[in-house]
Image: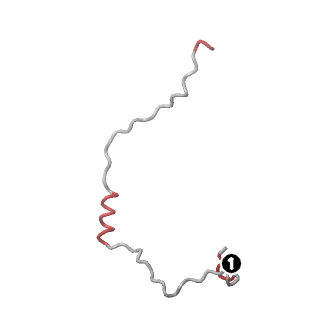
Amino acid sequence: MLRRMQFGQKRERFEGDPNQIMLPFEAEPVEVEQQQEQIKEKIEYTRNVQTIKGVRNFPITFL
């Protein structure tokens, strides 16, 4: 597909607009520090393990 985009026919070829402005994807250092602080938050809670209701032990009476 990439070769078609680069070397394909004129109607199939993708040519980027040279006048298009590049978007700034880099975050400011202050924002990066705030995001890292949020990631480092310690989560303290107890989690209840879900039990599977459809699986039960085989009754001894059938043995």
Q: Quadrant of residue 24?
A: bottom left
Badge 1 is on which residue? 4
Q: Is residue 63 left or right of residue 56?
A: right
Q: Number of marks in the image?
A: 1
The residue furthest bottom is: 19
For residue 13, above or below residue 34: below
Q: Secondary structure at mark 1?
A: helix
Q: Is residue 61 left or right of residue 4?
A: left
Which of the image's four quarters has the C terminus? top right
> Residue 42: image x %, image y %?
31, 51
Q: Closer to the camera, 7 or 41?
A: 7
Q: Quadrant of residue 39?
A: bottom left
Q: Closer to the camera, 11 or 31?
A: 11
Residue in the image at 30% along x and 66% along y: 33
Callout 1: few (<14), some (14-19), or many (20+) C-alpha neighbours within 10 Å?
few
Residue in the image at 31% along x and 68% along y: 31
The residue furthest top is: 61
Q: Closer to the camera, 25 or 8?
A: 8
> Residue 52: image x %, image y %?
51, 31
Residue in the image at 32% along x and 48% along y: 43
Query: Looking at the picture, which amino acid does disc 1 mark?
Result: Arg
Which of the image's four quarters has the N terminus? bottom right
> Residue 18: image x %, image y %?
52, 87
> Residue 37: image x %, image y %?
30, 60
Residue in the image at 68% along x and 83% along y: 7
Q: Quadrant of residue 6?
A: bottom right
Q: Is residue 16 left or right of residue 45?
A: right
